Amino acid sequence: MHLLGPLFLLFEYLAFSNSRQWNFEHPDTLYAWEGACVWIPCRYTIPEAGMVLENLIVYQNYVYDNKTRDYNGTILYEKTMSQMPVSQGRVKFLGDNKSNCTLHIYPVKAQDSGQLGLRMTSKSERWMEKIVLNVSKTAPPPHIELPPELWEFQEVTLTCLLNFACFEHQIKLLWSLEGSHQVPSVLLTSLTTQTVFTQSKLTFQPQWTHHGKNLTCQVWNDAADRLLSQETVWLDVKHSPKLEVSPKEAIVTVDNPVTMTCQVISSNPEYQTLSWLKDGAPMREQETLQREQKTLKLTLPKVTKQMSGKYHCEARNYMGSSTSEVVLLQVRYAPEPSRVQIFSSPAKEGTRVNLTCISQANPPPTNYTWYHNNIEVWRGTDETFQIPQVLHMHAGNYSCLAKNSLGLGRVDQEAELDVQYSPKEVTMVIQNPTPIREGDNVTLSCNYTSSNPSVTRYEWRPHGSWKELVPGVLTIQKVAWNAMPFTCAACNLWCSWSLPVNLQVQYAPRDVKVLLISPRSEIHSGHAVLLRCNFSSSRPTDIHFFWKKNGIFLKEGRELSFGSISPEDAGSYSCVASNSIGQSTSEAWVLPVLYAPRRLWVSISPKDSVMEGKKAVLTCESDANPPISHYTWFDWNNQNLHHDHQMLRLDPVKVQHSGAYWCQGSNRLGVDQSPPSTLTVYYSLQTISRRVALGVGLCLVILFLAFLGVKFQRSWKRIQSQQGPQENSSGQSFFVRNNKIRRAPLPEGLQSLGCYNPVMEDSISYAMLRFPVGETDTPRIGDAGTPEVHRPSLNRDNTVTYSVVQKRQVGDYENVIPDVPEDDGIHYSELVHLGLGERPLRQEGVEYVTLKH
């Protein structure tokens, strides 16, 4: 049994000696005071993965017992898996069994100072972690951190730090500067496993007045509003010397003494030099300087006006130099000789001019007297004499006299006021004799009365390619009829313009044109038409008008009227407007007269007699406005040919086309038709040859028939002579007179109606002659002149029929028209019975045939 105890301890030692290192994060030392609280932020890591904290014991001032091989001490807190935590009530474990080991002690006591031990065990691991706790009876003072040096006007940041922070005991850090109220700052609290503190940062610019003053940081209990502790530091602010002078202002009359004192009121480090300056320049050696501790006096035993000025003193140390306030030394004296300054000269007429009287005096002058060309013009208290609108009469020499309480000054020098102005009374003159005509050369001159400075150039309006032969004289070549009014300007530094001058150029009437007054619409034949001759302008305005038609004089007057216009009135009209300068003719204006078709006639091309097989063109000529839009053609039978063009083409032309043609035309105003025109188509040589051959054949047949007829007649007579006596008829003779009816002459255009066709024209006429034999027949004288007595006929009903063949007149051949054309109808024969009576006279144009039986 005695051997088992040491052996067991050996096994435990070997087991714990091989334990691995636990990792902890927490502040090494925490500070607090009695009655406050301690917040211990803590984190841990168990070496063996997956292990959790099973037991926790918080010891105060623990010790290790070698006998028991364990730790002993006051247990402030204990927590195991098998029982509830055991504590004194002030300690709270705010962590967990994995990584957080944060502790909170409230309230904390002074005897809590020392070491806190955290005994932590897991299933197979153990560890003791030490935390130092520093608890005082009262709150410790904060710590103020200053930079090595404080320089004037250089911004710095000061830190007030207290190593304490606890949520249950809130505090604040306040700054205060000696001689001033609390200074605003920024408060920061840190409660981490690395640091636990409360700090306040103060940012400010030190002034030289902060040098030697105390800066305090105080710790206050925020809940009880009670001061807990504080820390104070002395400020050592480096700055340049600070100076003070007296008196602030010195007013001394000429020849009296004056003393000025400069004192160094602060310097860190001490100043090295101290001196007086006048108007920025160091004082000369003859001035009296008295040096005392941190004081430098300047004494001027007898001042002059030149000593007036700005005085100041200057001190220097290694921080830099400083300058005191300015001491203004005013030396009183009467006004000095005055002079005049003009703002500005030369001055433009009409502007404001300020004249200033400059005279040195102390006190300043209170009264001024102004002179213009040695004549007093104004008195006043202002040093400035103002002319609101300067005129050229204000030019001259100006002077002034100043006065103050010490006396009256005198005039030193005068100033000349130069008043400049544009040329005066500018006028433009026409040098030409009037009136001016269009195309004349005109000379204009530009005049003025005065100018300061002198005129250097001239300007003209309107602008153009004019020639200025000499300055101020302008020549206009070939002036235009519509010349604008001219004006000129004489210029120096400024220009003055004359009033516009109208040249009143005379010219012939312009823009002459023909205006149709009525009707407003189309002009139709029969309308009343009024034309007017219009123009835009004329100078002079006495105008005469006359009209031309197609370039030929028509009539005078401005208006041209037609009571009932006809197509013959259409033409090109122009009007002429004239005055004493000349005349202008309008552009030709065409007067259009609209009318229905008229004077239609048919023209035949190439001529009205055309050989068959050629081409014939019939054109419907017309007179119409607007032109004919529709044509209709008709033949000699008034048959519509259904051809609606102006020209009727017959190609090739045939004999059957011979005849009269006429046309009809229409536009939107009406319809008209032409008289007939005859187209004659004659045979060609080939046709004539065929017809001649046919005619000759017919003639031979007729001759043959005639020959047969003669033969038959002779035979018949022979037979009759062989018959019985024929007393009643042997002595009778008959003459047949063939009256050829003369036809009326045909018109020239109708004479060529065709070719003579003997086959068609030759016809046989039959006449039946009956000779009744009566008892009362009277005897007739026979051929021998002896009377004969008719014998009774053998047969009273016997009838003899004679056949008469027409004989053509000479000239009745093909293509030849007789002088007296014959009727194509029937030839009439007159039977004349020649008895005992007197024989009728032979008539011209009658053929006589003797019939015997």
Image (cartoon, rainbow, N blue to C red):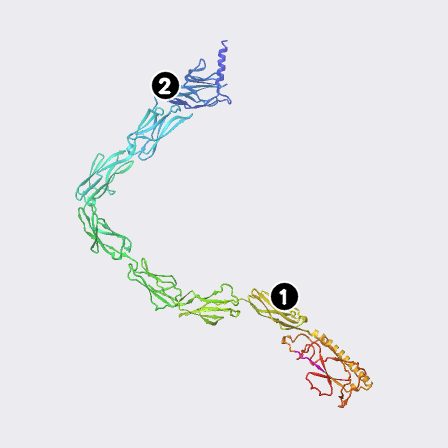
The quadrant the C terminus occupies is bottom right
User: Is 740 a magenta residue?
Assistant: yes
> Who is closer to the viewer here, 238 or 327?
327
- For the record, the magenta segment spans 737-743
Question: Mark 1 Cα within 10 Å, few/some/many (few <14, many 20+)?
Answer: some
Q: Is residue 512 visible?
A: no
Q: Secondary structure at mark 1?
A: loop
Q: Please rate how many residues cluster around mark 2, counting C-alpha atoms within 10 Å: few if below 14, some from 14 to 19, many from 20.
A: some
Q: Where does residue 401 sit, x and y in percent of width and height?
A: 20, 51
Mark 2 residue element: helix
Choose between 373 and 568: the one closer to the eye: 568
Instruction: Using the rendered view, name the quadrant where residue 85 is placed.
Output: top left
Q: Residue at x 37, y 26 (%)?
A: 198
Asked if residue 52 shows in the view, the reply is yes
Mark number, residue 110: 2
What amino acid type should be assigned to the residue bearing mark 1? His
Q: Earlier in the sequence, mark 2 or mark 1?
A: 2
Name above or below for residue 850 compared with residue 12. below
Could you tell whether 371 is left or right of 515 in the image?
A: left
Question: Looking at the rendered structure, which numbered label has been put on residue 643?
Answer: 1
Q: Above or below — where is 695 with respect to 113?
A: below
Left or right of residue 100: residue 773: right
Please tell me whether residue 728 is drawn above or below residue 649 in the rendered image: below
Distance in Å between CA atoms under marks 2 and 1: 145 Å
